Every structure is written in structure tokens, then in C-alpha cells.
Amino acid sequence: MYLSRRFYIVLILVILLLGSGYVYAPLFAIGQWALFILFLSVLADGYMLYRIRGIRAFRQCAVRFSNGDENAVNIRVESSYPYPVSIEVIDEIPFIFQERNISFRAQLRANEGKVITYHLRPTRRGVYSFGRVRVFATARLGLLLRRYTCDNPLDIKVYPSYLMLHRYELLAISDNLTELGIKRIRRIGHQTEFEQIKEYVKGDDYRTINWKASARRHELMVNVYQDERSQQIYSVIDKGRVMQQAFRGMTLLDYAINASLVLSYVAMRKEDKAGLATFNEHFDTFVPASKQPGQMQTLLENLYSQQTTFGETDFSSLCVHLNKHVNKRSLLVLYTDFSGMGSLDRQLSYLKQLNRQHRLLVVFFEDADLKNYIVTPARDVEGYYRHVIAEKFAFEKRLIVSTLKQHGIYSLLTTPENLSIDVINKYLEMKSRQLL
């Protein structure tokens, strides 16, 4: 049982009346009656609250959360009181969110239930622990509060952004991927795999007409080609200290993991095989490329617990183990970052080795905050110096792209927020140009 704010306000007024009785005697008698009425009101309020267990509450949410996305949490509160009550609902959310204001007020009529909805946006993968749901109920008089402790503690696993996959899936079904920024790539020539011969319909490319088949059937027939299938696409993720940099609450590793999941999904829709490799000071996780129905879940489970380390990544170990595990020529999408030309020079020989045996696409990050700072005008001498340094860092990023291109290595420089879209567009472009 808790005393409400209203009780203390009324009690203060009663005390003032009693105190005023020393100045004007009739007020003391009025204060005594007010104190007696307050006592009876408290008894009546307590009886209304405690005569039955009138509140039930339970939490409803997904069995797993999506990292970097808004995840809905519903709290269902039901009243079995035969009269209206006021409630305050406090959900004990995981401490990692560092929020202390997850409380909601509502009015419930007799035998009424309500659903309270709020959203949480996790920025780290792992296990998040919810506590209990606390409900404070007050009756009509509002002098007392009864606390109800409802529901049980709950552990929720936060996975890489599978909600993003659902958005891609829905738009892919309706062929509206351009809404997300995925470009329609103009194909040069024909795809490499012949599928079938069919009757010509208006709109077919006349260059695909099969004249021999047309002569035999006495009607126009055209060749139908399809994308080359069963190519291996590996997402290779660097987990070293360079991927610990944060952008909008999420590390570069988290952005790379989300992008690799989306790329794997799109590749499998294109009938390609998707695989995974992660490394830091040593070669870590390896998932062979496949397009089986359970492959996406396998990738999700392997990416769920990946964390960055503080060591220097070992590209030589990556080369050795990829040569051992990947025999067929594949597209390797390497997610990493370079602070400058010095860090690239240390790894360039290994990148060239990977590119000789496979098709390598190096994906690294442009500092969005630095980019925004450069376009702001300098206001003093110190500002000019800062701008020169910032532009030097930005220039080195562009120089890395140029250096990789000189050695025949494809690269993609992008911001974390545009990573998924840019990687998919690059994959579709390379596939259309038959570079895989």
C-alpha cells in the first residue's frame, strides 16, 4: 500500500485547519471533523482497492528483437474491478537502454482492458533482460495506491536487422525495390545461361529472334536467357578495432552485419549461393555458400554473437583459410575500414592475392560527420586548420579508391546509413556486367 500525492495534499490542508484553530477556535473543530472524514475515506479507499485482486498485466513482444530497428512492445492491462480505476504502468526495460521514464498512465472502466504500446531501438546485439511489469492502481477517491507486480522476467535476443529483410522481401515480391534506392541496372548484352525458346510477343528484343526455330514453326520464336546462377557470394567481415567506430549508436560492425544479411538475401533470390566468413586476429567463422531454404537462418545465428576486438586484423590468415575453404572462384565482399593510405599499404598485398583467386569487392566507410563538417564554412583561423585536416582525411579515402582501382580491385566507399543499398546496387551492377 502506498499513500498518494492527493492524500498528502488533503492531510496538509487538515493540518492547516487544525493549526488555524489556535487563532480562530471553530477552525480547530472543523479540522477534527476533516481528519475523521479523511480517516474514513482512507478506509473506504483501501477496501475498494484490496477487496479483490483487480489488475492483471502481461507483456507482449516478439521473441527476438531486430538490431537498429524500432521494435514494438505491448503491455496488456486488464481490470476486474466493478468500478473505474486509474493506473500507472511501469515496465522494467533492460538497463542497457538507460531509460527511466517508461511509465504510462491510463483510465480503466469497470472490467475493461487496454493495450499500451511503446517501441525500443537496440543498438547492440546480444541478450536483453526485461524485469517485471509494475502497475499502481487508485480507486475513485485516489488517496491510496495498490501496487501489482505482474508478468515474469523475460530475456530477449537481439539479432541483426531481420526487419530490414522483411521490408526487402515485401518490396521484392511486388517488384518495388526501387523505392529503397535499388537501381534498375541496364544489362550489356545477354546473360550467359540459355533458358528456353518461346513465341515472340510484342516488346521482346528482336535481336533475340531464333531464325531457325522460326522457320521450323512458321512463326517468330525468340531465345530467352536468364541470369547466370549458382555463383558464390561470400560476405567477409573484419571484426578488428577499425570496425568499433560508432555511427548513430551502432558500430560499423553492426552496419556490416546488417548489409551482409540483406546482400545474402538478394543473392539467394538471384539463385546465387550466399556464404559468410569473419576474421580478426585469426580466422573465425566460416559458413559455406549455399542457397538452401535454411541458409538465411544459419547466417543469422552465426552473425548474432559476433563482436569486435581491440587487436589488429590478420589478413594473411584470411588468405590462407579462404584458399583452404573456398575452391570455386567467388565474389568476396570484404567489409573493413582504412584510416589512411598507411593502413591500406599494410594490407594491399593480401588484397591483391585474394583478387587473383576471386573477384574482390572492398567495402569501406566514409565518415558522414566529417563530410558534413567539411561543407560548413570556417569562422576563424583554427576553423581553417580543422577544415584542411578534415579535407586531407577525405582525400585519402578517395585516394584509397583510386589505388585499389589501379590494382584491379573493385571498391565501394559509402556511409554507414547507405551501406545496404549501395552494396546491393554494386552487386547487381557487377552481376549485370558478368564480372562475378
Image (cartoon, rainbow, N blue to C red):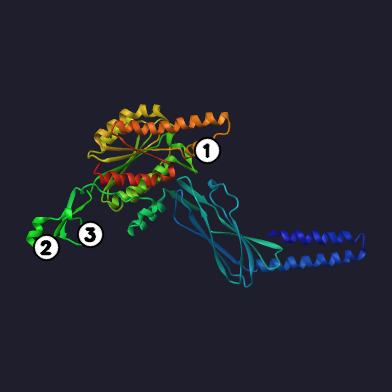
Can see residue 296?
yes
Give the spatial CA distance, label 2 vs label 1: 65 Å
Residue drawn at 48 percent across, 32 percent down:
390
Residue picked out by circle 2: 219
Q: Earlier in the sequence, mark 3 or mark 1?
A: 3
Residue drawn at 41 percent across, 53 percent down:
163
Residue picked out by circle 3: 203
Give the image location of residue 283, x and y in percent: 34, 35
Asked whether the residues under the numbered discs 3 and 2 touch, taking CB atoms below 8 Å apart as contact, a structural biologist would say no
Can see residue 301?
no
Check disc 3 and give the amino acid type: Gly
Q: Earlier in the sequence, mark 3 or mark 2?
A: 3
Check disc 1 and give the amino acid type: Thr
Position of residue 135 in the picture relative to residue 12 (left or right) = left
Give the image location of residue 313, x and y in percent: 38, 32
Q: Earlier in the sequence, mark 2 or mark 1?
A: 2
**Could you say which disc has been placed on residue 376 in the image?**
1
Where residue 355 sits, quadrant-wise, is top left
Check disc 2 and give the amino acid type: Glu
Position of residue 436 in the picture relative to residue 171 (left or right) = left
**Could you say which disc has been placed on residue 268 in the image?**
none
- How many marks on residues? 3
Local secondary structure at mark 1: loop
